[in-house]
Amino acid sequence: MPEGDPTGDGGRIGQVSFSSAPTERAVEVDLEAIRHNLRHLLEVASPARVMAVVKADGYGHGAVAVAKAALEAGASWLGTAHISEALDLRRAGLEAPVLAWLHTPESDFAGGIEQGIDIGVSGWELDHVVAAARRLERPARVHLKIDTGLGRNGCPPELWEDLLDRALEHQEEGLLRVVGVFSHLAVADEPHRPETDEQLRRFRDAVAVAEDAGADLEVRHLANTPGTLSRPDCHFDMVRVGLGMYGLSPFSDQSAEDLGLRPAMTFATVVAGCKEVPAGQGVSYGLSYRTERPTTLGLIPTGYGDGVPRIATGGPVRIDGRTYPAVGRIAMDQLVVDFGTQGLIGTERSPLGHRAVLFGGAGDPPVEEWAAASGTINYEIVTRISGRVPRTYLNKGHAGD
């Protein structure tokens, strides 16, 4: 008798059938797509260098695997938000230059300095970096960040000269080196907006002030993925690419394919159950969906516990070459699709155990459709897929196009 089968009839109780096939969920990451995208962005940015941004566990793709693929494809730098993320890269044996730029007073500045991690400084961090460098008797490498208009971290323009003066004084003491100046664009994903021009002007002014004060800069960097793709005047010495490296578009009116990019992530599972139901059958919590006719429902074993947004009713699931919308409320561990026809169970047409793809590359639903169903952006969908979903990697070896 199969495990969990009290009937001994192969898992069928009335009109409900259960699969003995694996029901694992998996995020499949195509590392050759990462390499392709990085090479393409290198061509777009040339002669500027490229920093591959692998914060948030590589936008959910796996920071170490993505970082290795990006470096193979020609990235010069890696970027993380937190020092702890950068230290994980070092522990994985990656020796490329890494910049970390988002800190708290508890951040491991000493660990970052010891491991040769460049540290972004917007103001208050300078004292912490200097204190750690003094204890270690080793100079820190810092990139000073100017707020050109985004309004998050970054030094306000009116305090820029003071920050420079203090940093260069510490440089004279041998406690740090000011090796970079950077900022971040606010609306580069909307190329028609004039604020990018103003940010660019402020950045150039800040760089000029730094160089006039005696800073010997190795890198000046401003452009993110949309800035890289749409504003060559923002490239400077280096661009920072995140979303584009993962094969996703930052623009609402251009697809990844339009931009020459290949989505690297596929989120796949299998149909874990099929059930024949009558017309009027309610589906999932709240019974917000009821079947219009007798039909077959399919159970997909993934939900908001895996990072699928609870509000994304209508999100697409591709099964056997057809796309079905998720119906009813998405639960913690599962969602439901309506196949729209009866008589599937026990036939060759039964989708039980068949591959079910929520989003992926060519031929699969694009992640943007799940973003639209959730009222959010593609960045959020890929980064929120939880650690409960294992990552599997395709094309681990360095291969050409």
Image (cartoon, rainbow, N blue to C red):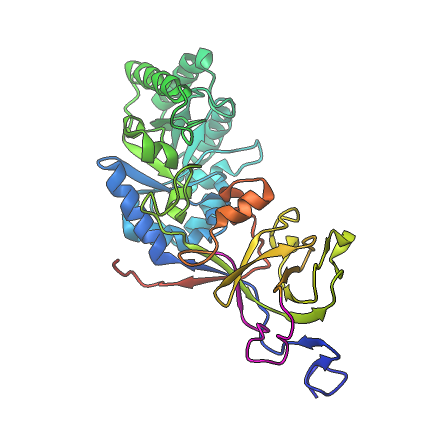
- Identify the residue at horizontal 33%, vertical 17% (top origin): 210
- Is residue 348 located in the magenta-colored stretch of the structure? yes
Where is 351 relative to 226, above or below?
Answer: below
Q: Residue at x 26, y 39 (%)?
A: 44
Residue 252 in the image: state x and y as whole percent.
44, 37
Q: Position of residue 351 (x, y in %)?
A: 57, 72
Residue sitting at 66 percent across and 49 percent down? 310
Q: Is residue 175 at least partly visible in the picture?
A: no
Image quarter of the C terminus: bottom left
- Give the percent coordinates (x, y) of residue 67: 38, 50
**Is-magenta flag for residue 162?**
no
Q: Relative to residue 273, is residue 105 depicted above or below?
A: above
In the picture shown, does residue 15 fall above or below 143? Answer: below
- Figure quadrant of residue 248: top left
* Quadrant of the rendered image containing residue 396: bottom left
Position above or below: 234 against 306: above
> In terms of depth relative to the viewer, which is nearer, 90 or 334?
334
- Visible in this render: residue 322? yes
The answer to which of 67 and 149 lies nearer the viewer is: 149
**Viewer-side residue, 10 vs 102:** 10
The residues colored magenta run: 341-359
Quarter-of-image position of residue 164: top left
Q: Position of residue 265 (x, y in %)?
A: 45, 55
Quadrant location of the N terminus in the rendered image:
bottom right
Instruction: Compare residues 240 and 28 and report the one nearer the observer.
Output: 28
Number of labels in the image equals 0
Q: Main secondary structure of the magenta part?
A: loop
268 with respect to 313 (left or right) = left
Residue sitting farthest toward the front:
293
